[in-house]
Amino acid sequence: MTPDQKFTRYVRLSLAGFVVIFIYYLIADMFMPVTPQARVYHPVVQIAPQISGRVTKVLVNNNQTVKAGDVLFEIDSGPYKLALEQAQLALDDAKLQNKRLDTNVKALEAQISAAKAKLHEQQLLNNRGEALFKQRSISEQELESIKANFEASKSDVASLEAQLAEAVLARGESGAQNLALRHAANQLAQAELNLSYTQVRALSAGVVSNLQLLDGAYAVTGSPLLAIVANKADLVADFREKSLLNMKPGSLAQVVFDSRPGEVYNAHISTFEAGVSDGQLSANGSLSSTETSNRWVRDAQRQRIHLVMPDNAKLIANMPSGARATVQLLPESTIGQWLASAQIRFISWLHYIY
């Protein structure tokens, strides 16, 4: 065989190999897709104080594991203790004021009783005066004086009854339902709550990350001061839309992590992401913008799926957030699953190299 014939043979074999690989790629991308665009994500909880004040003590260290309820740092409690004492004084003052109002009500009730007794006396005098006037025993001037005293007594009773109604209204309901006591009790509860906020606690278990907080820093309400990486983990993978055509929730998958080369783990699809940021429209009052591309074949849109590893849940829970992985989806056919497993195992060994 001449050198030209050997070269021609090599070219033909190369072209045949390229065609076989290209066809395999097309089929594999449709029925057993693989993607290196996969990561482990942990929810990150930003810790922000609910009150403002000077940080007096940081009780955790960077990368420290914490449990829900652990105190992370403390804020100067002095002003909030004074506020609590002031609220307690306001409550005591409200109770004392109610006692004063009760005493005032009783005093007005006694005055009304005396005024009604005097009114009864003046009514008797008025009746007797009218009878005597008819008998010409008293003068008209004396009768008018008696009537004036009778009307004055009625006015006194009406005035005292109005004062009693106002005093009862100011006193309000008795017991815990009293409005003044409820206001004071509410202020006391708020002061106690604010004092409890001086100890900032973790609401979920996790690991403190990127801690930059030091004693003496000023905490502002609602401004995050540290972050906790939660123990819960989520494995996500991004595939081209076409590659997910034959996949559904529950489809089997195999996963290789960059940090654990040569190891292949079983998984399955749990859910498909509802959408991506490219498909989100905001009501911002602007006109719609069209997509522009100079490419004849545009880039394929990727969609995100979520996977679970029931047999290795603790493994991904202990991985750092952002850990990279490669995900191989398995078809339903036995031959396809064998080819896909061989493909992902080949990739897992490549991770020893790069």
Image (cartoon, rainbow, N blue to C red):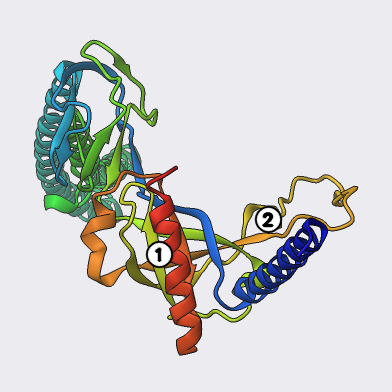
> In terms of depth relative to the viewer, which is nearer, 281 or 319?
319
Percent coordinates x, y for residue 265 in the rendering? 32, 66
Which residue is tagged 1?
A: 345
Q: Secondary structure at mark 2?
A: loop
> In terms of depth relative to the viewer, which is nearer, 279 or 6?
6
The quarter in which the N terminus is drawn is: bottom right
Which labelled disc corresponds to residue 82?
Answer: none
Structural crowding at the residue carrying mark 2, measured as other residues with C-alpha within 10 Å and reported as few (<14), some (14–19) or many (≥20): few
Q: In the image, is residue 187 above or below residue 82?
A: below
CA gap, disc 2 to disc 1?
Answer: 37 Å
Can residue 78 be spotted in the picture? Answer: yes
> In terms of depth relative to the viewer, which is nearer, 283 or 156?
283
Q: Is residue 83 left or right of residue 303?
A: left
Percent coordinates x, y for residue 160 in the rendering? 24, 42
Q: Is residue 255 left or right of residue 88?
A: right
| Residue plotted at (32% across, 55% down) | 233
> In terms of depth relative to the viewer, which is nearer, 309 or 136?
309
| Residue plotted at (13% across, 51% down) | 176
Structural crowding at the residue carrying mark 1, measured as other residues with C-alpha within 10 Å and reported as few (<14), some (14–19) or many (≥20): some
Name the mark nearer the viewer: 2 or 1. 1
Can residue 251 be spotted in the picture? Answer: no
Which labelled disc corresponds to residue 280?
Answer: 2
The quarter in which the C terminus is drawn is: top left
Which amino acid is tagged 1?
Arg
Q: In the image, is residue 41 above or below residue 306?
A: above
- Lower position in the chain sequence, tag 2 or tag 1: 2
Which amino acid is tagged 2?
Gln
| Residue plotted at (64% across, 52% down) | 277
Which residue is outermost to the front? Answer: 1
User: Based on the displayed image, in which of its 4 quarters is residue 256 positioned?
Assistant: bottom left
